[in-house]
């Protein structure tokens, strides 16, 4: 459809993430994102968000292909994908009554679902890191009302699997580069983060070795 990567994951309740987020919010590290204190049940379990949900399809679009309005571009591609899926598998593959397409817009833990779908790992900069696309990607999701079986005929590239397994290892380039200390203590402190307050900071993404192939695009 034009995405740079795609994966699927069976719906489940993200109990560990719920615990982590509850503690993070209790420490006040979410700043004034008070919306994170609401809809917790839905955020941690897509089946509470979309009744009948069985699979999360996660797609990634690199910064290089998203243009200025990435929400619009990602959503437009997701709607095209949804139309194709309905054409092949029937209208009932998605909810007729609940929103089931998301891009940075609903209570759904996007980065965690990227990991669940095998698309990468969460780095020390708290970004999703795809083994070849790096962190400069926009995720979008479609929640399906059917299970999706993994395609065992197309095995993941071994090199990518090894990179995901290795993760950040002993690298600390991003935490060293953060000018405010927002990544101290292995947590992201939104109250200290420039990107959260002004939306203009890539200091913890530019030095990442996983972005070296993409930063010049
Ligand atoms: S976006 Fe900037 S301020 Fe925020 S964590 Fe990254 S480097 Fe630090
Ligand atoms: S800069 Fe290093 S520590 Fe930070 S996310 Fe990238 S690999 Fe991980």
Image (cartoon, rainbow, N blue to C red):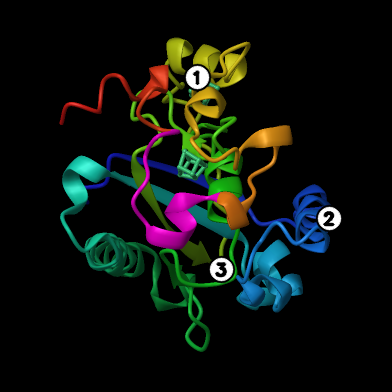
Q: Residue at x 43, y 31 (%)?
A: 130
Whichever of callouts 2 and 3 sits on the residue coming sooner in the sequence is 2
- What x and y, as percent, mark residue 38? 71, 78
Asked whether residue 215 is in view, the answer is yes
Q: Position of residue 175 (x, y in %)?
A: 56, 28
Specify whether tag 2 is near ligand 1 (CB below 8 Å). no
Identify the mark at residue 150; answer none if there is no mark. Answer: none
- Residue position marked by numbered label 3 in the rendering: 145
Location of mark 2 (residue): 23
| Residue located 31% across and 63% down the image | 78
Residue under the image location 53 percent in, 38 percent down:
150
Question: Residue 100 in the image: x percent, y percent?
Answer: 48, 73
Mark 1 or mark 2: which comes first in sequence?
Answer: 2
Q: Is residue 43 above or below residue 65?
A: below
Q: Does residue 199 belong to the magenta stretch?
A: yes
Query: Is disc 1 in contact with disc 3, using a CB cutoff of under 8 Å?
Result: no
Left or right: where 105 falls relative to 184: left
**Nearer-N-terminus badge (1/3):** 3
> Where is mark 1, residue-wise?
173
Report the side of 204 relative to 80 (left or right).
right
Q: Is residue 18 above or below residue 217?
A: below
Q: Look at the image and tell me whether residue 9 can be seen.
A: no
Bin the neighbour count of mark 3 within 10 Å (Cα to Cα): few under 14, some 14-19, many 20 and up.
Answer: many
Q: Which residues are magenta?
A: 193-204
């Amino acid at each position: 459809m034009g995405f740079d990567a795609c994966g699927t994951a069976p719906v489940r309740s993200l109990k560990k993430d719920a615990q982590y987020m509850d503690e993070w919010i209790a420490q006040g590290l979410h700043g004034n994102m008070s919306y994170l204190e609401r809809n917790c049940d839905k955020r941690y379990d897509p089946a509470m968000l979309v009744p009948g949900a069985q699979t999360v399809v996660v797609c990634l679009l690199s910064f290089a292909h998203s243009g200025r309005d990435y929400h619009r571009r990602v959503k437009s591609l997701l709607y095209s994908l949804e139309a194709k899926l309905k054409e092949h598998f029937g209208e009932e593959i998605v909810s007729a009554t609940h929103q089931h397409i998301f891009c940075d817009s609903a209570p759904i833990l996007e980065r965690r679902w990227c990991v669940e779908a095998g698309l990468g790992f969460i780095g020390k900069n708290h970004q999703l890191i795809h083994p070849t696309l790096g962190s400069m990607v926009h995720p979008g999701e479609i929640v399906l009302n059917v299970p999706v079986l993994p395609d065992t005929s197309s095995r993941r590239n071994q090199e990518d699997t090894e990179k995901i397994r290795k993760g950040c290892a002993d690298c600390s380039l991003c935490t060293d580069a953060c000018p405010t200390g927002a990544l101290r203590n292995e947590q992201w402190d939104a109250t200290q983060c420039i990107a959260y307050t002004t939306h203009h900071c890539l200091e913890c993404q530019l030095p990442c070795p996983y972005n070296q192939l993409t930063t010049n695009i």
